[in-house]
Amino acid sequence: QVQLVESGGGLVQAGGSLRLSCAASGRTFSSYPMGWFRQAPGKEREFVAAISRSGRFTYYVDSVKGRFTISRDNAKNTVSLQVNSLKPEDTAVYYCAASVRDRLAYESSNSYDYWGQGTQVTVSS
């Protein structure tokens, strides 16, 4: 069982930045590919970014490339999402997720087995 707890959300003006963090329980964090997803009101949950077990490979949805950066610290059991140049359309609840699968489609929410409770990001114009 893996427990994930997000933090770092808040209200920010357009153009601002936040750093979202996700703390994971368990001793085998380094074996989990990790992802960030978001869900805006009235919309489906969408993929934002993902990172491989070692952190060597990262993946992003096109709309956040160049603005968001995913990273992980396996020694501290944390994964982070640095979000810069925020836009009002980035407003959503952001979730981190962990996968226990050997192979996965990083951008698919179906690939992930454990989810955090989410952290709200609100960007004002």
Image (cartoon, rainbow, N blue to C red):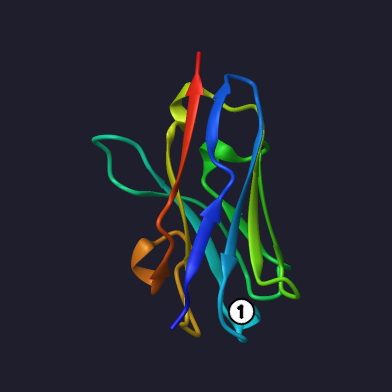
| Residue 112 visible | no
Query: Is residue 75 rendered to the left or right of residue 118?
Result: right
Report which residue position mark 1 lands on: 29
Q: Tag 1, which secondary structure?
A: helix
Depth check: 34 or 119 in front?
119
In screen coordinates, is 56 left or right of 63? Answer: right
Image spot of residue 72 (x, y percent): 69, 64
Q: Residue at x 27, y 39 (%)?
A: 43
Q: Quadrant of residue 44?
A: top left
User: Which amino acid, by three-letter code, is at mark 1?
Assistant: Phe
Q: Is residue 103 left or right of residue 69?
A: left
Looking at the image, is 121 positioned above or below residue 72?
above
Residue at 47% x, 78% y: name it: 2
Q: Residue 120 in the image: x percent, y percent?
A: 45, 40
Above or below, 55 against 84 in this view is below
Horizontal and vertical percent for residue 87?
53, 24
Q: Residue at x 65, y 79 (%)?
A: 30
Q: Quadrant of the N terminus?
A: bottom left
Is residue 53 in view from this perspective?
A: yes
Q: Nearer the viewer, residue 21 or 63?
A: 21
Q: Is residue 124 left or right of residue 77?
A: left
